[in-house]
Amino acid sequence: DAMVIQNPRYQVTQFGKPVTLSCSQTLNHNVMYWYQQKSSQAPKLLFHYYDKDFNNEADTPDNFQSRRPNTSFCFLDIRSPGLGDAAMYLCATSSAGSYNSPLHFGNGTRLTVT
Amino acid sequence: DAKTTQPNSMESNEEEPVHLPCNHSTISGTDYIHWYRQLPSQGPEYVIHGLTSNVNNRMASLAIAEDRKSSTLILHRATLRDAAVYYCILRDGETGGSNYKLTFGKGTLLTVNP
């Protein structure tokens, strides 16, 4: 089945140690998104790619970066994780054919910072 | 993004219909009404969307008020598996812009009792 896959499901990193989260998709969608979801809160958009065009949200900290080497893969890099960056990180995709194309989400990577 | 207002929580009994309300009094003419839900420990999942007319799919029905300032997501027979946070989101359906974003509000936590 076509889907959005995030690995790993759980990631533990140390305070200040760079970490990379991965997302792959088999849907061949143009648009890929990264959301951050803290406990009992709604998902918050960090940035999205339209093909290779990167769109950063105004309030996304500089500590968060992203790479999209090809259509299928997207990475979230956290350069110096703080305790406040512990959260679920969700990757999603959508087709650029219509603004109403639904988003397809992965099941997330839960990041713990020790 | 135009704002939506939903109750924080609702309860239902298994096999009974559930009506989840959403107010969006500042909706614009090009905004589509989208619903997503998030089951525990999973990424959000698309449920349904509509513009003016009521919509039905295999998961749910969407009833949209004539003035479009409110809508209701209808689950015809709730099951335990429908226990989730339900998000009502307005999304600009006008093409030609650069906005593919989906911005989540707080949502409604639906509890289904056996």
Image (cartoon, coloured by chain):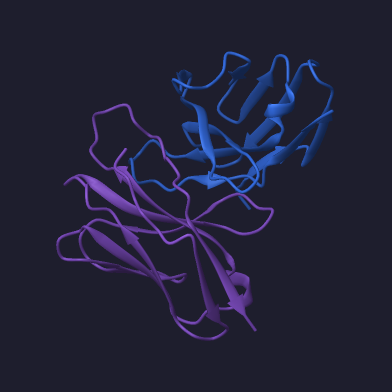
Chain colours: A blue, B purple
In the image, residue A27 sits, relative to residue A78, either above or below, namely: below
Q: Is residue B61 left or right of residue A112?
A: left
Q: Is residue B102 left or right of residue A80?
A: left
Question: How far across and down, in percent of the image, does residue A15 sit?
Answer: 81, 20
Query: Which of the 4 image quadrants contains residue A38?
Result: top right
Whether residue A28 is visible: no
Question: How far across and down, in percent of the image, does residue A56 sit?
Answer: 47, 20
Number of dots carrying numbers: 0
Instruction: Please report the residue visible at 20 percent of the width from the left and 58 percent of the height from the top.
Output: B68
Quadrant of image for the C terminus of chain B: bottom right
In the image, residue A7 sits, relative to residue A61, either above or below, namely: below
Instruction: Please report the residue visible at 73 percent of the width from the left and 20 percent of the height from the top.
Output: A81
Quadrant of image for the N terminus of chain B: top left
Query: Which of the 4 image quadrants contains residue B103?
Result: top left
Instruction: Please report the residue visible at 57 percent of the width from the left and 45 percent of the height from the top.
Output: A41
Work out whether residue B23 or residue B46 is closer to the camera in this orientation and state it: B23
Whether residue A19 is visible: yes
Outermost residue on the front side: it is: B8
Work out whether residue B100 or residue B15 is closer to the camera in this orientation and state it: B15
Question: How far across and down, in percent of the image, does residue B74 sit?
Answer: 40, 73
Q: Is residue B111 left or right of residue B5?
A: right
Q: Is residue A63 left or right of residue B86?
A: right
Question: How far across and down, in percent of the image, does residue A71 sit?
Answer: 55, 28
Instruction: Please report the residue visible at 49 percent of the width from the left and 85 percent of the height from the top.
Output: B16
